[in-house]
Amino acid sequence: MIDQTMLQPPTLPTNYTVKQGHIKTSTGKTIRTEEMIINMGPQHPSTHGVLRLEIVVDGEIIVDCIPHIGYLHRCFEKHCEHMTNYQMVIPYADRMDYCSAMTNEWAFALAAERLLKIEVPERVEYIRVIMAELQRIASHLIAVGTYGIDSGAFTPFLYTFIDREKILDLFEMTCGARLLYNYIWIGGLSHDLPPKFIEQAKDFVEYFRPRLKMLNDLLSYNEIFVKRTANVGVLPKDVAINYAVSGPQLRGSGVNWDLRRDDPYSIYHKLEWEPQVGKGEMGTVGDCWDRHIVRMHEMEQCLNIIEQALAGLPEGNVKAAIPKRIRPEKDAEIYVRTESSRGELGFYIVSDGTASPFRVKARGPAFVNLSVLPEIAKGAMIADLVLIAGSIDIVLGEVDR
Amino acid sequence: MTAQDIFDILKVKFSDALTEKKFDTVQPWVRIAPNKTKEICFFLRDDSAMQFDYLSCLSGMDYNNGTFGVVYHLTSIVHKHKIVLKTFCTKDNMHIQSVSAVWGTANWHEREAFDLYGIIFDEHPDLRRLLMPDDWEGHPLRKDYKVQEFYHGMKVPS
Amino acid sequence: MPAVGTYFYNIFHSLYTVIVGMKITIKHLFTHSATVQYPTVKMKIPERARNRLYVNIDDCIGCDQCSMACPVDCITIDTIKSTPDVDLGLTSKNTKKRLYVPRFDIDIAKCCYCGLCVWPCPTDCIVMTDVYEFSEFDRKKLIYSFSNMSTDEIAGAQERLKKYDEEQAAKKAAVKAAAPITPPSSKPESSAS
Amino acid sequence: MEIIQKLFANELIVSILLSLLPLVFIIAYALVVLYTEMKVAAHIQDRVAYMRTGWHGLLQPIADMLKLLQKEDIIPDKADKLLFRLAPIIAFVGTYAAYAVLPFSSIYIGSNINLGAFFLVAVGSLVVVGILMAGWASNNKWSLFGGVRSAAQMISYEIPTAIAIIIVVMITGSLNLQDVTKFQDGGIGNWVVFGGPSPWLQKLMLMPFTIITFFILFVSSIAEVNRTPFDLPEAESELVQGFNTEYSGMRFAMFYLSEYANLFTVSAVGIALFLGGWSSPFGTFMSGPVWGIFWFVAKAYIFVLVQIWVRWTLPRLRVDQLMYVSWKVLTPWLFVCLLSVGLILVL
């Protein structure tokens, strides 16, 4: 009845040999057992985009997990080399990590500014910090919300989207776009803050604190959720560092490393805040719950930063330092890394003295964070794999660039 | 630890593998030989004074003159110092030793560099294309790259 | 805690957290919903909204700055030089227009709404409006032509320029014939830039 | 006229017509519950759900149904065609057959058999066969996972259900659901969940155990209809759609319908056993055969509402945790209840 060829494993480019075995039943019969290869994605609902995972399972236990990426490859780096101006890269950088576009443009703008040795006005720095932290909240809200969906709770997702909407309204008010802003320019900003921005941002901070508590009650500390995520997908400290994971994932593993503090840029050193580290409250340090809770706590810290930055916002002209011609020296090169919502976002730019960059390498945090997935997925169940992949919080736009 | 100190220590141990250095730029770099990368990187990672346990970025390069290269940006989480390593190869001999045994993160970065530049990393455990399809022709980020006309009968927009 | 204790604690703690969650959701059941009934009710769009591009062609001087700034090359501009005897009028910023713009096409399907074209414009004639509902069934309809020149006008302008160029070339040739040190110059520049 | 009279005189035709009555009911009920679920879910999530078809989208469930019926029926090429076609029918038959013994009112019950409660449990497990069949026949690995998970889940949750029923049977002394309901007639105080119509001391002693039993029956009923937090067989984020991934159109509608019909069945069992079935909560006030139908449906509806509320609040359990809940929490607690109730009744 069933076509036998369908039961054959598909050819694996990795030359994985499917292990076979035998078990004896109580009646004395022997039954052939075989590992099964399942394709998870690229159209699977919980792979957060077009990630394809080839998983070898023994029952529901994962024996091996091979990620295949590149379905969303848009040649970001090649495009950059063809731009006739550094400024034109920024709309493309927006589209890398579309959930956190503001931090992307900042990273590229910062790299170009260091390459050109531009000092930006104080006000620009403050506004950038406010925007980046708002963006971090928006991005973490998506991460937390979709993590709820992964674990089966649909409702928190929509609550987070209501809150995110308020942040996007702030962005739209400021620069006219809701998702891909092109707001942070090399040397400055495209617009100054609109008149009512500060008031509304303060309102948002007020509004969001109780919402965070509600989200924690509804999801983070729900016993079912805790039982699902605690002790699952444990990423030990040394493996995390060896795989150069960054951001909430690294901090979830108990490494106190935040580029905003450890490789300072902008005005973060003037503000008071604490990097959040996973403590293994519900299970082992570095499990999925730790990564989740680090994001929740980080949102609180973002609110603190925003409050301070709003209070200390100086006057100034946001377009004062924008250069007329962007033409770095010949053979100048720089690697600038910033703490984006997902971790270390670095741009390695090499100039050849012309107006278009010679080489731009984007070191995306999601790309690197995803590469550790096979390490931590082994031995988990399929249901856990969904949660592990969700806790990494990948954005395929950035993984594939 | 400054780049000079790191260079001095390395010079003692691997004198012949260090061929060039540049310290007057924003980010000082040291050039190492392509067949010694693994050894040097192991030393950099494990030496207690260095402890470069964090490979920030690994980028392939095409210098548009027949020279290809790989740039390593290293950080130490413990000591918080940084160093940039560079290694070069020529178009006829695109072999560079893999460092994926040293840092797990290098695995995917090297696969990406292989995919986009065609640099072959010796001793890499799983050197397959990463971003492009397995049967794609050419290496797109090379400066002399020409888009193939058809891919499985589909016209490739140039 | 002994194993038995954990067993009972887990059960009651689970029930407690479930009740906490259910309390939150039942509260939301009776709060006002956040959605907007889109086509009938529309959200307010802020002043700075960046949506469909609009070109005020009367102000355009054909400088090609916007097209150069565009990262996705969605703007195509052709220009024809005007002859000195024609007055193309002034822009709203009182600069003199010197170029005909027979073609100003924006492929709005390609546009990425980055707004980079708006800033370099010397006469502020290309702007982003707040219109966001402009989907079409035919992709070709998304190529907007803003030029208001008819084919006859374009042909006339080209003709005049050609004539003028020839006259100029003839004049130059005459000058050069008078001073035969330099070799005769090559043919005149092509009309369209 | 004569023909009609003759027709009604024929016992067979009358019984067929009578048995079709629940089918009409199921479809109407499914539409109502579908609408309720969408609206409640939406408002819990600060949305508004359908608003366009009819007043506040009242006609949308009908439109959904019509759409499902019209859709192309796709059978995968490599599927086991016979089983694939059979599976939704079996799943539906399982739920539909259960309606035979549900006491809708003091005069209307499909078949007043003495083994009513037993029949319910037995027929209910037929659904497992249908789902397992669907999972296997689809020839899709995700579906197979869903089918096997479903089988494991339903079988393990049949046990708490069965024990809960036994406890009620011990109190009421009958397996006939009509008798069980009649036993509880006469107001809210007589319901089994509050100890039944027994002397007050016995009632007081029974009450904690019956409440726990009722709660456990509620939990396992959620598990039996595969809803969050026990929706592993069709866990969207893990198994795409589980056993019904490959189904479309009419066949999918059958699964859908059987899910909603099953929702009513488990609720009906819960209320018939514990909440007085068709009997009015106010004693003789508003009681009678027609009011009986109203009370029965209304109580079941409230039961379903609570299930919907739970569904849109909680995350999903994992397979091993699901088994843990069934075997290590619900079943032992029920055994304690069973023993205690037995002891109290003997005293």
Image: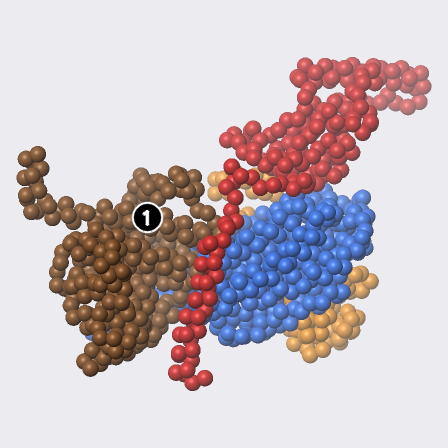
Q: Quadrant of residue A20?
A: bottom left
Going by the image, does A330 lie left or right of B124? right
Residue located beneath label 1 in the image: D32
Using the image, determine if residue C161 lies above or below residue A102.
Answer: above
The image quadrant where one finds the C terminus of chain C is top right
Q: Residue at x 66, y 26 (%)?
A: C146
Q: Position of residue D205 (x, y in %)?
A: 27, 78
Return the x and y of residue D301 as percentages of the image width and height: 31, 55
Residue in the image at 16% along x and 66% along y: D175
Q: What is the display colour for chain B?
A: orange
At 29% from the left and 49% from the top, the residue drawn is D29
Whole-percent x and y of residue D211? 31, 71
Residue situated in front as seen by the camera: A293 or A256: A293
A2 sits left or right of A315 in the view: left
Chain under callout 1: D
Q: Is residue D347 left or right of residue A100?
A: left
- Rendering colour (chain C): red
Label 1 crowding class (10 Å Cα cut-off): few <14, some 14-19, many 20+? some
Q: Which chain is brown?
A: D
